[in-house]
Image (cartoon, rainbow, N blue to C red):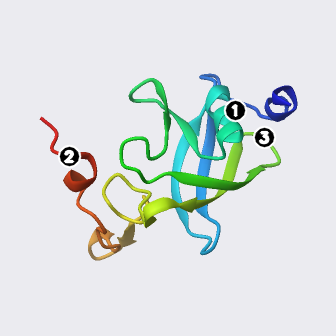
């Protein structure tokens, strides 16, 4: 099964695939992250989104610290095989580490630059605790 799963995927030169998490009900893009082969396999095995953190250089399951897990309902691979869209249900309604529904909460406004237009639903410190 994994040979077929991974066979159509064109990972980049670092072994990564762009993965887009989209709310299955609203269609809103909640976040974009990266997957390597292991993260994609774990996503399929568990039914919950797993990613690869480029900054931390490690695998992680979305929500492993915050509890805001992503239940995956469908995977769609683009025509080039280098981008994945996941139809997900976001547990707790928060996908962004800033405590917002979506990581895409800033809108460009010619007169004011990038403006945050989405409310913080839960303070980051309440989600992750105080960082030293």
> Horizontal and vertical percent for residue 23?
59, 65
Residue carrying label 3:
81
Of 115 and 76, nearer the camera is: 76
Q: How many marks?
A: 3
Q: Residue 3, relative to residue 35: is it above or below?
A: above
In the structure shown, which secondary structural element does the residue marked by tag 1 occupy? helix
Residue under label 1, please give it. 41
Quarter occupied by the C terminus:
top left
In the displayed structure, 5 sits above or below 114; it is: above
Mark closest to the chain's N terminus, 3 or 2? 3
The label nearer to you, 1 versus 3, is: 1
Q: Quadrant of residue 9?
A: top right
Q: Position of residue 106 (x, y in %)?
A: 37, 66
- Which residue does the image show at 35% across and 51% down from the upper left? 97
Q: Earlier in the sequence, mark 1 or mark 3?
A: 1
Q: Is residue 62 left or right of residue 38?
A: left
Q: Residue at x 67, y 27 (%)?
A: 37
Give how far across and how far down residue 84 sits, in percent. 69, 47
Dot 3 alpha-carbon crowd within 10 angstroms: few under 14, some 14 to 19, many 20 or more: some
**Does 35 sit left or right of 84 as displayed?**
left
- The N terminus is located in which quarter? top right
| Residue at x 28%, y 53% (from the top left corner) | 127
Residue positioned 64% across, 34% down in the render: 42
Write down the residue under mark 2.
Answer: 129
Give the distance between the C-alpha atoms of the residues marked 3 and 2, in whole angstroms. 38 Å
Q: Residues within 10 Å of mark 1 (few under 14, many from 20)?
A: some
Q: Earlier in the sequence, mark 1 or mark 2?
A: 1
């Amino acid at each position: 099964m994994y040979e077929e799963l991974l066979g159509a995927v064109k990972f980049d030169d670092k072994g990564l695939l762009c993965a887009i998490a989209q709310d299955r009900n609203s269609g809103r893009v909640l976040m974009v992250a990266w997957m390597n082969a292991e993260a994609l396999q774990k996503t399929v095995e568990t039914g919950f989104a797993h990613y690869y953190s480029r900054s931390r250089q490690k695998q992680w399951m979305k929500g492993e610290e915050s509890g805001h897990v992503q239940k995956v309902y469908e995977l769609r691979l683009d025509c080039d095989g280098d981008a994945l869209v996941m139809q997900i249900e976001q547990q707790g309604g928060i996908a962004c580490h800033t405590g917002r529904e979506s990581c895409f909460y800033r809108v460009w406004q010619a007169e004011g630059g990038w403006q945050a237009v989405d409310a913080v639903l839960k303070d980051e410190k309440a989600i992750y605790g105080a960082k030293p």
